[in-house]
Amino acid sequence: MSRPGQRIQVPDDLREVLLEFTISYLLEQPGDVVEFAAEYFSRLRESRTTALLYEGAAISPDEESTMSREEAKRIKMKL
């Protein structure tokens, strides 16, 4: 908990994630902000996990062709 007059440093990563979330929320204007946030951050976590798997496995273009082109395109766009 902060005390009056105490400044809190907001990490750049948190600021960036919250800004991206806010923009997505404002563009989509969903009815339920909590449900939207839960789905948004779940998708973000999944895309980061997938990105880490790609990096760790060093998947070649030949292996990538086993997934649909649309799926691969969505993953690359999220990176």
Image (cartoon, helix red, strand yellow):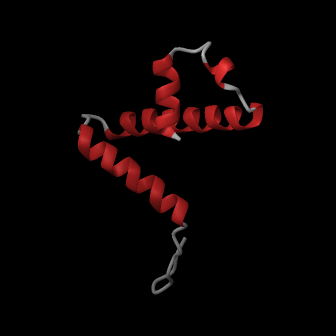
The foreground one among 47 and 25 is 47
State left or right for residue 27 relative to residue 48.
left
- Using the rendered view, name the quadrant where residue 53 is placed: top right
Q: Is residue 33 above or below residue 65?
A: below
Q: Position of residue 29 (x, y in %)?
A: 23, 39
Residue in view at x 53 percent, y 41 percent: 79
The quadrant of the image that shows the N terminus is bottom right
Front position in the image: 65 or 2:
65
At 63% from the left edge and 21% from the top edge, which residue is drawn? Answer: 64
How many numbered discs, if any?
Answer: 0
| Residue sitting at the far right | 57
Q: Is residue 27 left or right of residue 51?
A: left
The residue lying furthest to the front in this view is 62
Identity of the residue furthest to the bottom in this view = 5
Q: Position of residue 76 (x, y in %)?
A: 52, 34
As drawn, 28 above or below 7:
above
Q: Is residue 7 left or right of residue 50?
A: left
Determine the residue positioned at 30% across, 43% down.
25
